[in-house]
Image (tube, rainbow, N blue to C red):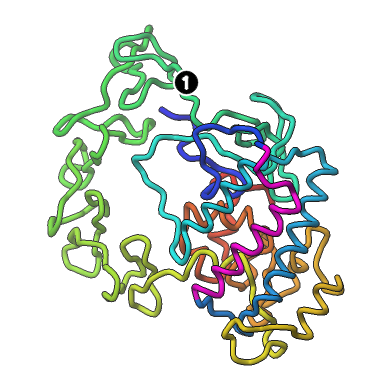
Amino acid sequence: MRTIDRVTGSLALLLLSAAAGGCKEDDPNVDSYVDGWSKTVCDAVIECNCDYPGGAQVEHCLSQLSVGAKTQAELLDVDGLTFDGACAQRQIDEIDRIGCGVFEPDPDAECEAPCKPWYGPMHAGGTCTNVNGYDNCNQGLVCDNGVCVHPCAEPDLPQRGEACSTQFGCDEGLWCDAVSTPLLPVCADLPAIGEPCLPPELGFACGEDLICDMVTDPGSPLCAALPGLDEECPVGACAEDLYCDSSEAPAVCTMLPALGELCPLGICASPNLCDSGLCVEPPPQVCGYYGGVPEGLGDGDGDGSGGESDITTTITAGESSGDETGFPATGTTGPDTGEFGSCCVANGTPGCDDIEVYTCVCESDSSCCADPWGETCVDAIELYGCGVC
């Protein structure tokens, strides 16, 4: 069983790479990375017709993003992180590849170590922390519960029939059986269909893709297959790609609503979102990198032509009220300003002020890419290892 199921950390969904190679001569330096990243994002923002309260302007977007990214880079350099031009270029290429779509992780994909534009000095097993949106672990490592680890490393746990510790368990699909042989527990297969579920202290566990049926005979719960399409789901679980529709009596397993279908229970088939009871396409992921022109200060048409505006001049001159990372001031913005609030607060804006944390969370919860940044998104920061609040 893997200790970590997904690559986490700074820009996780954009930085996957099987090898974390060093920079080559044709890889970007910090300045060209900042310019290239900002231009790639802003070009996509305009091409994808991202909708913001005050519209979008190319010059404003370039100014806002490049100032923030440059300041962040300077802070990361001072804090001892090292720039990797090859991984930085992969990040830019991935943004360009996704275009106006959204990232959809492949559940069957092989685990890959992160390729981080900025990495720290801490080796595997070292104590780690968040540094201005990145962890300070070495290249290819992630920060998991304050420790640098290899995200794809798998422990050599005991196999079927081998002695085991109930505290640390066995390999995937097995459990440490201290019931049959309490003096010398050994690894055994999890219960199959028709077999008694594991005891309550072990969570009534069953084999993979099985459930513990505690409804048919509560006194002797047995393992059962997950119910399929149009089958009753008394315990609320269904087979893959189905959900238990409790609006029926009795509840039955139903296909997840597709694009354009009603979603009375608020859920849709990925990557679609439920909006006002209807499944709709999620907005382009790239839209979350930029907050748009503050409402009332743009040219009014929101067509991206922008040109030279007063707000662009103000931000270029460094007179905006951003924090030390170059992002908008945290905790002081609202949904009508076109700027982002703090990632650590349910701020009511369609994103948050730390782009690395934002994109990491969106990998696991696509609703955080489109809906206002709420408590679920805040909780997901530490849940998925995207940072610390």
Q: Nearer the viewer, residue 58 or 237?
A: 58
Could you say whether the residue bearing mark 1 is in a helix, strand or loop? Answer: loop
Q: Position of residue 347 (x, y in %)?
A: 65, 69
Q: Position of residue 158 (x, y in %)?
A: 39, 14
* Quarter of the image that includes the N terminus: top left
Where on the picture, by quarter, is residue 276?
A: bottom left
Asked if residue 252 is positioned above or below residue 16 in the image, the reply reads: below
Name the residue beneath numbered marker 1: 155
Q: Nearer the viewer, residue 346 or 194?
A: 346
Asked if residue 31 is positioned above or below residue 80 in the image, the reply reads: below
Taking the image as shown, residue 158 lies to the left or right of residue 17, namely left
Q: Residue at x 51, y 42 (%)?
A: 16
Q: Residue at x 49, y 53 (%)?
A: 363
Q: Nearer the viewer, residue 174 or 280?
A: 280
Q: Position of residue 264 (x, y in %)?
A: 31, 74
Start and end of the magenta stretch? Answer: 25-48
Where on the picture, by quarter, is residue 27?
A: top right
Q: Residue at x 26, y 32 (%)?
A: 207
Q: Amino acid at mark 1?
A: Pro
Q: Is residue 160 magenta?
A: no
State whether residue 383 appears in this view: no
Extreme residue toward the front, this view: 26
Taking the image as shown, residue 11 lies to the left or right of residue 32, namely left
Q: Residues within 10 Å of mark 1 (few under 14, many from 20)?
A: few
Taking the image as shown, residue 169 lies to the left or right of residue 205, namely right
Q: Residue at x 81, y 72 (%)?
A: 316
State whether residue 44 appears in this view: yes
